[in-house]
Amino acid sequence: METVACDIRDFSLADAGKKRIDWAEREMPVLRLIRQRFEKEKPLAGQRVVACLHVTTETANLLKTLKAGGAEVAVCASNPLSTQDDVAASLVVHEGIQAFCIKGEDHDTYYRHIHQALDLKPTLTMDDGADTVGIVHSERRELIPDIIGGTEETTTGVIRLRAMAKDGVLAYPIVAVNDADTKHFFDNRYGTGQSTIDGILRATNILIAGRTVVVAGYGWCGKGVAMRARGMGARVIVTEVAPTKALEALMDGFEVMPMAKAAPIGDLFITVTGCKHVIRKEHFEAMKDGAIVCNSGHFNVELDLDGLESLANSKEEARPFVDQFRLPSGKSVFVLGEGRLINLAAAEGHPASVMDMSFANQALCAEWMAKNASTLEKGVYSVPKEIDEQVASLKLQSQGVEIDVLTPEQQKYLTSWQEGT
Ligand code: ADE
């Protein structure tokens, strides 16, 4: 067997990982079609892709697609807790893909793994949270001349990249995959909505019905979480800082109030804001005894856990992924998954059917970048409309759903201004 550079937990998990990757593939018809075309056309021949993504069964199917397209691929984790160790083993053993990721790796190992993946000397970077872009632009600048472009999966990463572009420091073009309609309408809303509840239930096995659930943030992810919590019988309160989103939450039928007012009322708190310290010391102190707190935003900064630790008399694991903090008042607050994204820490992330569209966009944008990079400026690019629409059409086809087409008369009507009342 050819030796593949890697740092993973256990090679013996490879066969179990392969079975789960194959299971996910059944739910990823769009990516499968793209892979079949890539196998013939090899649009990524000569490219070296460093992917910093959650290493899940769905990601494995994306990486296999990139390899089928002719790319050499190395993967590292985009979160220390999200790696599925069996998947990492299967990528190395069965697919010949370099993998540097171990579930539960510490801070130093997490960054060492990004560096090890970057040793592939990428021509393309693929991020979920912009961590490779960050390292390339700070500690590994010698890699920049070889990099033709990149892609970014998530809202938080796109915010960072736009800030870099605004400051004139972004050194190559990057496609914001998150901004495709076929990404955020579905992955952020239905994916986060379902997988967040899934992570909470796997960690705690609580009944949602009858509980008061506080959802911080009403972006696409918050909408999904609030909708699913309500669907399971919770009373849902939304907290927001943006007036329009707050109004939308109100008109969608949720209660809206500041966190200071929600803190003493909530039974379960879920942050999905992309912002820092949304739940702070004063909120933890005001919570009911037994309140459960978790985060489903990209970074673990949404909960001020240092603040909570400084308040607490003790901290102990109540069960896997559940830490009990005892406060001087005698009350306890339970934090799930160390404040990291609960859907990937305690569950398996979004279901394959929704990642099918996100990762179809990733694969097609990598192809687009390989074709077009020489004509692009440094900066953040939207997913081309044709790619977004192609992904939606293929997904509908895969579900056997047909839609109408405009008649010539309708087309004319929609592009003219003469017809009135
Ligand atoms: N982000 C959220 N869910 C995911 C999954 N299943 N795979 C990869 N990235 C994800």
Image (tube, grey):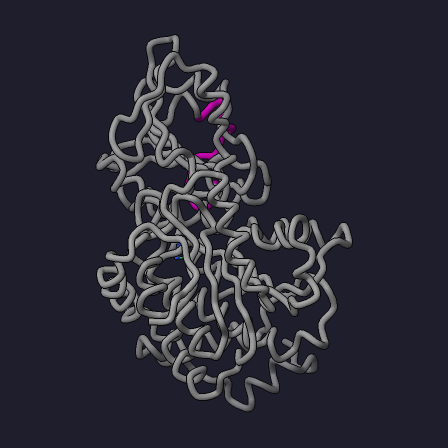
Residue 118 position (above or below residue 214): below
Q: Is 225 within the magenta? A: no
Quadrant housing residue 268: top left
Direction from residue 373 to residue 206 in the image, left or right: left
Residue ranking furthest to the right: 168
Direction from residue 289 to residue 70 in the image, left or right: right
Please identify the quadrant where the C terminus is shown.
bottom right
Q: Is 259 within the magenta? A: yes
Q: Which residues are magenta?
A: 250-262
Q: Position of residue 344 (x, y in %)?
A: 37, 47
Please identify the quadrant where the N terminus is shown.
bottom left
Q: Whereabouts is ligand 1, in terms of quadrant?
A: bottom left
| Closer to us: 353 or 222 | 353
Q: Is residue 32 visible?
A: yes
Total number of numbered discs in the rendering = 0
| Closer to us: 419 or 133 | 133
Q: Position of residue 251 (x, y in %)?
A: 47, 44
Q: Residue at x 45, y 21 (%)?
A: 308
